[in-house]
Amino acid sequence: MLLLRLLSLLSLLVLVTASMPVAKYRPLPSLREQDAMEKRWVEKRHRLIPKILRAHGYDAWIITMREYAEDTVFRSLVSTTTTFSARRRTLFLFHTHPNLTSPIHLVDNKPEIWDEVNRVLDAIQPERIAVNIDEDMAFSDGLHTGEGRLLASKLDSKWASRLSSCRAIGVETVAARAGGQEQLDMYRLMMENVWAMVQEGFSEQVVQVGKTTAEDLEWWFRDVMRWRIGTGTWFPPTVDIYRSPSEPSLDEDPHMREGDMLHVDIGITAMGMNTDTQHLGYILRANETSPPRSLVRGLHRANRMQDMNRREMVPGRTGDEVFFAVKRAMKAEGLQGDVYSHPIGDYGHSAGAVIGMANWQDSIPGGGQNKVLKHYWTSVELAGFGAVPEWGVETQRFELEEDVFWQESTNTFEWVFGQQTEFHLVQPKKRSGTGSDNDPKSRLGTSSPSPSLSLVEGLGKLLGWHFARWL
């Protein structure tokens, strides 16, 4: 009987993994250095665009805009460190002609600009010319109505008749992480700073039990990203507090209390790149060394969903195909939750394959038909559902989000910095017994063995195993 129980518990083991990383604040390069890097990445993207045009059967692509009425792809074509908006009339003409410079970049508000555009088209002789018009995809719909009408009227009729829209060109241009390893290194540096913020914010160094509110912590995050790290953000960070219904409600007591589960959704912006992260924390009670077992179980179930999402992201599949594959895998393992992963990069919700949406757990028009690409990044965002019997709650959301990149050596999407597999812990003010409240390992969520798992964990220690997560 004991052996059967052991085998049953062992069957719950999902994977063996190392502890999640401890992050440190790391300085960003100077603005001058950031600008130089961005310009290198932009130049590489410019060189990539003719290949994208050829892949979709186009010979030219016209992107025209006016100051403060920029095309959606504009920020992907310039260094955002020093170029904040279009000027006058700004026009890019990318093409596939082997002997002419691409792109042609014009900035002028005089009528003669159209003479130059027609002259270039005469030299290129394109059969198909792409413009950004699309009903479902913002990244391919940046041509403003008035500007589009003017373009069609100013081009020679021969060229105006060859204008058409192609969703994939705008999507693949914005999605491409053309900067290679240098760009990934900078993105990983940004992600580590986000982790460092969360690890500090979800600790007793910042949270004062009975005093700190969710709004207090939100503004703390804003100040740290602005003044300590030196970045902006693409959305205000949000902090949520979840607690047992037997405790005072948030309306009755909005201050953080022992036994609360914390959630943050946070991202930063620098060098034309955006991050997106959601983590969970827990405020320990005086008699606790780890969160309640059902909270840990809920986190690990959400981790399993993250791994399914990452595994099913096969280049060439559409976002819808990945979504339904993840849902099937969840059903096979008895997992419940919502999946709403999205590309990330030049925009927070960037171009590429959309894998479900928080408010729409089904096929997604436009983004759901986009394909997973190599050499781009995605935020694996989702919420696992689980019961918390210690709170008397049947369904609790465990919301997590981590960014992944395409790893060429393994042909898989891997975590940019890491995956949260343990709760960030806020230690109680006074801890009886030995051990320091300032032990960083404790703050990261190392938990004491649960009596029901002691047999398995004891065997694991003998065999040198590290149990990462249980369903």
Image (cartoon, helix red, strand yellow):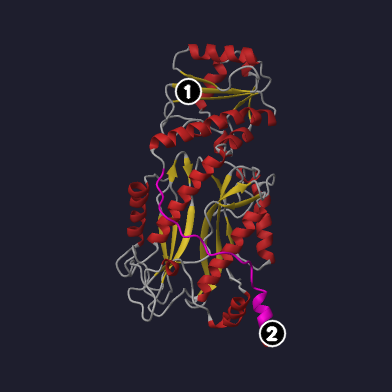
Residue annotated with mark 1 = 90
Residue 349, percent from left and from top: 52, 45
Q: Residues within 10 Å of mark 1 (few under 14, many from 20)?
A: many
Picture disc at residue 212: none
Q: Quadrant of residue 451?
A: bottom right
- Local secondary structure at mark 2: helix
Please tell me whether mark 2 or mark 1 is closer to you in this view: 2
Q: Nearer the viewer, residue 103 or 215?
A: 103
Q: Position of residue 415 (x, y in %)?
A: 56, 53
Q: Nearer the viewer, residue 217 or 457?
A: 457
**Residue appearing at x 60%, y 55% in the figure:** 361
Q: Residue furthest left?
A: 211
For marks 2 and 1 on the same chain, the one whose residue lies earlier in the sequence:
2
Whether 132 is drawn above or below 225: the answer is: above
Question: In the rendered image, is residue 406 in sight?
Answer: yes
Instruction: State how many labels appear.
Output: 2
Residue flagged by tag 2: what amino acid is it? Leu
Would you place residue 308 above or below residue 133 in this image? Answer: below
Disc 2/disc 1 C-alpha distance (Å): 73 Å
Say whether residue 348 is visible.
no
Q: Residue at coordinates 39% horizontally, 47% vertically from top-left?
A: 27
Front position in the image: 393 or 277: 277
Q: Which residue is mark 2?
A: 3
The amino acid type of the residue labelled 1 equals Thr
Q: Are marks 2 and 1 in contact (CB under 8 Å)?
A: no
- Name above or below for residue 31 compared with residue 297: above
What secondary structure do most residues of the magenta stretch adopt?
Answer: loop
Crowdedness near tag 2: few (<14), some (14–19) or many (≥20) residues, C-alpha within 10 Å: few
Task: Give the magenta-colored segment's residue range.
Answer: 5-28
Name the residue at 42% across, 36% down: 33
Residue 321 locus on image (x, y percent): 68, 50
